[in-house]
Amino acid sequence: MFKGMNSQFKRYFDFTDEVNIALENNRPVVALESTLISHGFPYPQNYEIAQEMESIIREYDVVPATMALINGRIKVGLSKSELKFMATSDKIFKVSRRDMASIVAQKLNGATTVAATMIIAEMVGIKIFATGGIGGVHRGAESSFDISADLQELSRTSVAVVCSGAKAILDLELTREYLETMGVPVIGFRCEEMPAFYCRESGLEVDYQVDDAIGAANIIRVMKNLGLGGGMLITNPVPVEDAISMEYMNKIIEKAVQEANRKGIVGKKITPYLLNKVKELTSGKSLKANIALVKDNARVAALIAREL
């Protein structure tokens, strides 16, 4: 058990030996979410991607810590059998801040979202987290008030999140405005625009740009030293060879949204429906881009963690 952890939390947590040793010896660690495994990709692709992301991080002499809740235990790092369980079980809840206490108390299984992964990472002292895209303000939120908990978590939880912007199916302009309102710095990793998940461009400027991992690590360090609190978004565009143009993607998303509206799909079901519909309408191009960007974000997060 990681000794540096707040004692009130310890009874709820399990660490893999690899993660425990790394934290005890102040070695670099990158947090990974498990919603990507349980709800993001189909099996066996999800299991293979989860293992590949961990392998990429280890290539840089950094330790991956995939987060999940299994039988009510908060897992910091997963064994191969636990990774496979998260990839194959159909009885896994999607866990955000509001769900954590209930899932732990009732000894259920849960896949951590961006918000939940950030919370756990901060509890155990992990400073950086790699994911695909964050949640954000949904289209039509001015009447539905559908805004992802990821955004509020970024404003109050001190973890840097490496991602490829917000999911393109969202209202990107309102998401960017919300981040600004909540004081979340959006740092472009070798980019001037906040990427739009499958697309390298969005027309929305980042707050500041860094050219390498050293620059990103310096901002994280100074933010911590100044006691500013809250998280940071480090946006890394999808690799050029796998990117999809924004013009083409907007047309696809509009079709998917119109179909969802006709079918009356709302709430928790809307995001997975739209992502699946987009995959279908792009003949799998969106899935290829998604896989490429999550792997590259793992690489960038490992580089930054090593500098920290």
Image: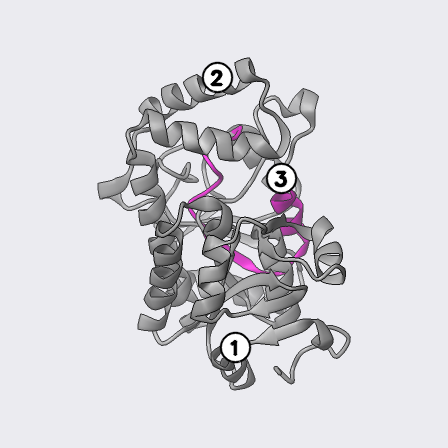
Work out how far the residue at label 3 is from the one at label 2, CA to CA, in angstroms.
Answer: 22 Å
Residue 230, position in %: x, y? 65, 56
Q: Which residue is mark 2?
A: 259
Res. 301 visible in picture: yes
Amino acid at dot 2: Glu
Q: Nearer the viewer, residue 237 or 87?
A: 87
The disc at residue 16 is 1
Q: Which residue is mark 3?
A: 148
Left or right of residue 168, residue 282 in this image: left
Vertical position of residue 96 compared to residue 58: above or below: above
Which span of residues is magenta-colored? 149-171
Q: Are discs 2 and 1 less than 8 Å apart at CB?
A: no
Q: Residue 168, located in which quarter of the rendered image?
A: top left
Q: For the point 51% across and 84% down, which residue is it?
A: 21
Residue that protrudes farthest toward the left in the picture: 241
Residue 258, position in %: x, y? 49, 15
Residue 212, position in %: x, y? 35, 60
Amino acid at dot 1: Thr
Decide: few, some or many residues near mark 3? Use Cα within 10 Å; few <14, some 14-19, many ≥20.
some
Work out how far the residue at label 2 is from the one at label 1, CA to CA, in angstroms.
Answer: 44 Å
Magenta region includes residue 158? yes
| Comes first in the chain, label 1 or label 3 | 1
Amino acid at dot 3: Ser
Assign a secondary structure to mark 1: loop
Q: For the point 67% across and 59% down, which residue is it?
A: 229
Vertical position of residue 17 compared to residue 37: above or below: below
Magenta region includes residue 92? no
